[in-house]
Amino acid sequence: MITPQSSLRRSERSRRATLDAALELCTEKGYGRVTVEAIAARAGVSKKTIYRWWTSKGAVLLEAFTDAFVGATPFVDTGDIALDLRTHINSAVRLTSTTPYGPAYAGILSEMHYDDALAEAVQEQLVGPRFAAAEDRLRKAREQGQIPADADLPLAVEMLYGPVYYRHVLRKPPQDEATVASLVDHVLRSLGAEPGSPG
Amino acid sequence: MITPQSSLRRSERSRRATLDAALELCTEKGYGRVTVEAIAARAGVSKKTIYRWWTSKGAVLLEAFTDAFVGATPFVDTGDIALDLRTHINSAVRLTSTTPYGPAYAGILSEMHYDDALAEAVQEQLVGPRFAAAEDRLRKAREQGQIPADADLPLAVEMLYGPVYYRHVLRKPPQDEATVASLVDHVLRSLGAEPGSPG
Amino acid sequence: MITPQSSLRRSERSRRATLDAALELCTEKGYGRVTVEAIAARAGVSKKTIYRWWTSKGAVLLEAFTDAFVGATPFVDTGDIALDLRTHINSAVRLTSTTPYGPAYAGILSEMHYDDALAEAVQEQLVGPRFAAAEDRLRKAREQGQIPADADLPLAVEMLYGPVYYRHVLRKPPQDEATVASLVDHVLRSLGAEPGSPG
Amino acid sequence: MITPQSSLRRSERSRRATLDAALELCTEKGYGRVTVEAIAARAGVSKKTIYRWWTSKGAVLLEAFTDAFVGATPFVDTGDIALDLRTHINSAVRLTSTTPYGPAYAGILSEMHYDDALAEAVQEQLVGPRFAAAEDRLRKAREQGQIPADADLPLAVEMLYGPVYYRHVLRKPPQDEATVASLVDHVLRSLGAEPGSPG
DNA sequence: GCCTAATCGAGACGGTACGTCGTGTCTTCTG
DNA sequence: CAGAAGACACGACGTACCGTCTCGATTAGGC
């Protein structure tokens, strides 16, 4: 498992120092050059302690990552579906293009392909909730008649998130806000929605 | 550089053995567990020879990859823009979901984040041409009035490829043909195109 | 110090469990593979407790060792110097060739070279008393005229004990009783003693 | 095995640097504190190289040791048995009491108890030849009538070497030359030899 | 027969070293 | 003379113990 086994005796000091060191090193050298050895040295923590609470470098960074983004992207419902989607996608763009989280996330995505537990954790803790939140917001819009009743919501979410990931994994520059607005408009139009609020 | 230095004396036998061994190992163990050491041993080739012709494991696999897909996805123009886009995207889906190329490509995408030369090579040899081909085909459709004159073509291409990458990097199941067809329809509709040929 | 600090609250149960576990492990794996960690686990005792009462693994085994041999080799004076020396040396041979004490003693001798406190303790508790006992018995024999007045007693004791240690540290098979008898005779003759009782 | 597998490609430079570093560290810190890690660092050699050619720290030091003493103690036959034995035993005393070889040898003796291959190597390369040489010299003396025909030669050799080991392993001060001379005289007398040349 | 402090088990902690593996370079021998 | 074989210095891996350090939970004496 990725989430640590329960223990009452765990040192919060070591935990924080480890996560902070991992993020720092990710910024300085890039995920691929970060080693457990270096994290331990930077954090003033023993390697044993790291291996006691995490299964891999990826698990450490995932925790650092989720820690930082807990509650960071709540999905507020302003009533304006286009606005809310823009807000949501913009936060994702920022997430993946801000140091040190962007490089860290790219690394986590890499590691997912060889580490099943990590893949599962990413799905459950990061991707799943955001995907669901976007789908829920679209569903509400559909119920309110802002988008047609037969709209394919999962497809819409993929069309929204897809380009963000596309740019991130191919190291292309992240979308600016205007591009995101245009993307949201296109997706809504593709569903058959009436042109809504101005981007 | 990724593309090998020219040489008149290069052994084609060693080249093929190396690429084949790399793909085999990728299938068996996954990209992350493939090592130059193991490729050399499997191929019956010395490490020195590998390092002479490639800069990294990623470069070997990229060559194995492009080798296999040279001319594999020509962009035929049938006159039906929706059909041609479906064909194109389906080939990309197949590319990323077929053993051993799917796992290999995931690995290459990982390595791109730490290997600038590899990133450049991927862009030039794989991503760029395909992106351009899709854009060109859309441009022709625009010229023929099948899609509006003000359509944002790069955005459209990103909306088409984005979901493919999204699923690939997040280890979600690849799209089936119906889903791809629906995606293409949605993208065309988002551009303001008239509903076209039935999927 | 090697001998434990005095305490009224010390748990005899823990003490015995520790010593027994240490001897068991010494038999099973050999001194070099015995660790404080393993002793604690086997004894159902915490490492802290071991470190509270002993300074090192060597100290634990020395105590286990001396515990077992307290009063085990009294030097009885039968009036027959050769017989008494044979008895004495035979007990030393048995000491060093009996499981688990032989391997434990070999380990203690090893550790002595890096642990001054242990070296001192071995000298004071084991080697010194036995050497003195042998020398005393020889002195009495000298006083009774059984050996010449100018006999070099310390040299004699070294000649008696030397071969026992020689075989022990070089992992040669221990002397049998006939060999010990012959050794004692040779040593006595070397001092210029009249040939004594038959072996 | 202790003696390295044959190879034509072995780097003599690395070999010497390793042996020298091992001896230096043995002098500085004592055998027990010497680590393969430290030997490698000091020698500017990789740990892998050490593990390639030796099985353990003990094997390294044994080779350093035997290297230094190859041909160092030839058994010259002057015709005077007492003189020759004194020479021989004195060389053993010096061997075990000279930095860095004394501490190194103590460590090797320790390790022998847990490392069967090392034990065998010590017997074959160091102890066996010296024991045989001493026994041979005594045999010649016996043939020449300098000692009785029924003399127990192995026992004599043990009586000669025993005290040397006794002092070495118990960390007592080494014999001086007068003590060695007296020891040799006693042993010869114990065999029934006529008092020989003056010490 | 309580009360309270030392002692106990358990085990997390910062470390050091282990022995192994992979990297990328370099050398030697062979076809 | 390119290529296989593989030794080399380096550095990270993940593990084992070290000796120190909290933690509650007994568990004795002194009251």
Image (cartoon, coloured by chain):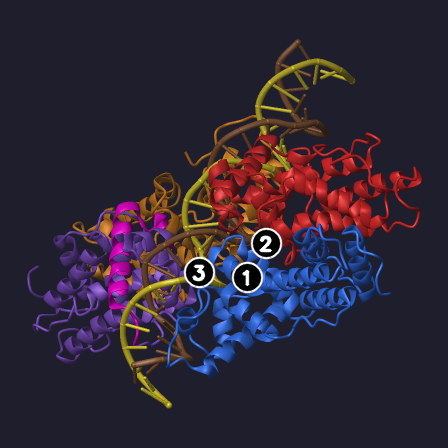
Chain colours: A red, B blue, C orange, D purple, E yellow, F brown
Q: Please tell me whether residue E6 is drawn above or below residue B166 in the rendered image.
A: above
Dot 2: what SS?
A: loop
Q: Please tell me whether residue D180 is drawn above or below residue A49 in the rendered image.
A: below
Disc 3 is attached to a residue of which chain? D
Residue at 92 percent of width and 50 percent of height: A150
Q: Quadrant of residue B197?
A: bottom right
Q: Please tell me whether residue B54 is drawn above or below residue D108 in the rendered image.
A: below
Q: Which residue is mark 3?
A: D114
* Mark 1: few/some/many CA within 10 Å (<14, 14-19, 20+): many
Residue D74 on image: x %, y %: 15, 70
The reply to whether residue A70 is in sight is: yes
Amino acid tagged 3: Tyr
Look at the numbered discs 2 and 1 and tell me whether their residues touch, using CB distance below 8 Å.
Answer: yes
Span of residues in magenta: D8-36
Q: Which mark is residue A170?
A: 2
Amino acid tagged 1: Val
Residue at 25 percent of width and 52 percent of height: D24
Dot 3: what SS?
A: loop
Predominant SS of the magenta segment: helix
Side of C92 where B132 appears, left or right:
right
Magenta span has D17? yes
